Image (spheres, grey):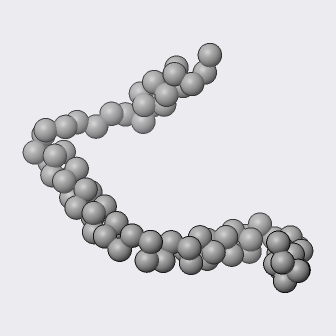
Amino acid sequence: MSITAEKIRTELAGLDATERAELAHFLIQSLDHGADEGAEAAWDAEIRDRIRAIDEGRVTGVAYEEVMRAAESRLVP
C-alpha cells in the first residue's frame, strides 16, 4: 500500500460508522461504473418477467417464514 493510501486509511479509521459506510458505498459505486452496461436493462427485464409470471398465475410466492425455516434446516446442523 502506498504512503498516500496508508495516510487516507488512517484518517478514515477516525470517522464514525455512518461516514465510513457512505464512503464505502461511494468507492464500490466507483468500481462498478460501466462494468456491465447491459446489466440494469437485463435486471429490469427479469423483474418484469417475474411479475408477469405471478400475475398470470404461473408461479406462486412462498412465505418468508417458510423460506427461512427451509434455509435454517439446511444450514444449521
Whole-percent x, y for residue 50 in the image:
22, 50
Residue at 42% in and 31% down: 67
What is the residue that sits farthest to the front in this orientation?
Answer: 2
Left or right for 29, reference 51: right
Q: Nearer the viewer, residue 28 or 35?
A: 35
What is the residue that sits farthest to the bottom in this orientation?
Answer: 4
State the quadrant of the C terminus: top right
Which quadrant of the figure has residue 66? top left
Whole-percent x, y for residue 24 in the image:
67, 70
Which quadrant of the figure has residue 26? bottom right
What is the residue that sits farthest to the left in this orientation?
Answer: 56
Q: Nearer the viewer, residue 69 or 25?
A: 25
Left or right for 25, reference 15: left
Which quadrant of the figure has residue 13? bottom right
Residue at 31% in and 61% down: 43
Residue at 19% in and 37% down: 59
Image vertical order of residue 62 relative to residue 5, above or below = above
State the quadrant of the N terminus: bottom right
